[in-house]
Amino acid sequence: MKGNLWDADAPPEDRIVDALVYRSRLIGADPDLVVWGGGNTSAKTFESDFRGRMREVLRIKGSGTDLKSIDRGGFPGIFRDDVLPLLARDEMSDEEMVAYLEHCMVEPGGRRPSIETLLHAFLPARHVDHVHADAIVTLTNTPGGDRIVRDALGDDIAFVPYRRPGFQLSKHVRTAAQDSRAVVLEKHGLVTWGDTARQSYNLTIELVERAEAYLRNKTAGAVGAAHPVPSPRDSSKLLLRLRGRLGHVILRTETGPAYRAISDRDDVRTIAAAGPATADHVLRIRPWSCVLDVEDVEGAVDAYEARYRAFYAHHATHGLSMLNPLPKVFLVPGFGLIAAGKDATDVRVTAEVAFHTLRVAAAGFDVHGAYESLDEEDLFHVDYWPLELYKLTAAPPPREFAGRIMLITGAASGIGRAVARHLARLGAQTVLLDVHEEGLRRTSAQIVDAGGFEPLLVPVDLTDEEATAAAVHCVIHTFGGVDALVSNAGIPAAGRLTDVSPAAFRRSLEVNTTSHFIISAQVMRAMETTGLGGSIVYVASKNAFGPGAGFGPYSVAKAGQVQLARIIALEGGASGIRSNIVNPDAIFEDSGLWSEDVRRERAAAHGVPVEELETFYAGRNLLHTTITGHDVAEAVAFLLSDRARATTGAVIAVDGGVASAFAR
């Protein structure tokens, strides 16, 4: 744990909500206290209602928010005097509780408050914090946890046996808190409070530090083993096969020493099957982790799925629908941890939550000789708990390319940049390749500013076979595979054939044709290993079918690129790999092809002034229109999508209609 971080920058205590935001972010910034979305904090203040009456209001973390980045808007308000009469009730279902709280909200129709709102509301202290600290949970997740908590933290800390969050747990905590200065919840975490924000925070840090010290003194040492480390080729194959079994997900690999300390243990299978540290972790990481056998990836996943289906069949009641039975967390001896998620953000959080759960389980065995998660019935009820499943239904629907990993070459400018931006808007996880690193950074910034997932930037010379192979392996190790390639990189190559040197001609072929072959071969191998099919789109040129005099080296190379695409369609079809071509023409916007030299040469070839070149090209097509990078991006997106699932070997012209370049 990072320790006590309260400092002079803290807001004054009379700014109650600001102080709440400050301490919430301190807590949220430490993953040893809470992981993403976990924990909850609150403060009680006085505010006027819609009639102007001053009333006590509980400001509590809203459902689905994250403490490390929360702001004032993340704390919906509940009128406390509407909630306290519930103390007289003996029973209240989750559904009744949620419906009741909707009538108590300061801002009706606003963000739903935490599922543990009543726990905070029933405690009289002004400030309340609830964390799922690893050290605290390690104390409780073992037989005799109540005794261990007393030994570690003292007799003035209450212990409440496990109960799912809700009405009954809130009443139990209120009762336990009357004769104690904090409450530990079995298999759940720690509740602290104070008259000031700093008092509540200080008590949290004090008790977690005491728990950590206790565990350090008791640790007997991990059980480790020597395992062969998979080669880069073998680990790539493992990731591709795993993703092929899971479907269109994003994978994240964690191979550092902390992860290897878990994956390489002799008892790794026991730890993987032990269950989550707290109920909050279940939806993120599923009930158990899966230990992968490098030689039989599919068999390990099949065994996990069979176990989950039996688990569901044993506990399910009428009306339930089974969640995805496949695992999300994998331990690979000699390698580390692999997590699966719907996107890069989701998988990062999944890996973080999994690490903390697995570390708690490992510490339980090392310190206590045993680890005890929720029993199977409680585990099932949490997995299918309506209040937690609500978070899934509240999420926006997935975008068209969600979970798709798409490589775009020549992404530092022009068409490549426009395509990358558009695919990212549609939810793709983009990978940007180009020799111009600064241009890649600018493209990435535009994607992130527009709300897309942060791209992977791979500066690479695609004419270098070894470097290109390394680039594709980097993508596999970062995200787990490749679903699409937009092969767009290219250079201009002008001049009459009588004037062009063989070296210049070869250079055009090398960049505009051979480099596309090199990366296509690498991507096809990955797609074939995964078995999920894929799509490749080649950004060629109108010149492939309608060459221009004085532009021979470029036109010949682009014709070769089209023929390459057709061969890929022929050879990739059996594996579900589609290959199509987009032929644009005269796209000047943000282009790296239209240098001043090229503009002058083409203007001279067409007998028009340089400053009128763009107008000339727009005027010569049948639609008399200017073509943009976004026009090309729209065509590319269609060909990559499932809407074009039955299309391969096709050419789409995005040139405004140039009759001499009609495909034939």
Image (spheres, rainbow, N blue to C red):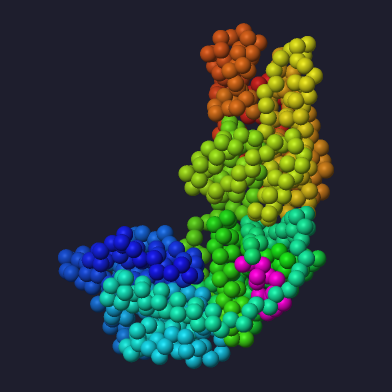
Q: Is residue 263 magenta?
A: yes
Q: Is residue 660 magenta?
A: no
Would you place residue 302 above or below residue 141 in this image?
above
Q: Looking at the image, how many numbered discs can be counted on the residues?
A: 0
x and y percent of residue 300 in the render? Answer: 74, 70
Magenta portion: prevailing SS class: helix
Residue 498 figure quarter: top right
At x 56% / y 9%, what residue is drawn?
A: 609
At x 49% / y 67%, what residue is drawn?
A: 31
x and y percent of residue 3 in the render? Answer: 43, 69
Would you place residue 161 above or below residue 448 in this image?
below
x and y percent of residue 211 in the render? Answer: 48, 80
Residue 109 figure quarter: bottom left
Name the foreground residue: 582 vs 590. 590
Quarter of the image where the C terminus is located: top right
Q: Would you say 413 lies left or right of 541 here?
A: left
At x 53% / y 38%, what residue is drawn?
A: 442
Q: Which residues are magenta?
A: 258-275
Residue 315 figure quarter: bottom right
Name the foreground residue: 212 vs 204. 212
At x 70% / y 36%, what residue is drawn?
A: 461
Name the foreground residue: 400 vs 219. 219
Say if residue 430 shows up in the picture: no
Would you place residue 450 above or below residue 139 in this image?
above
x and y percent of residue 451 in the render? Answer: 49, 47
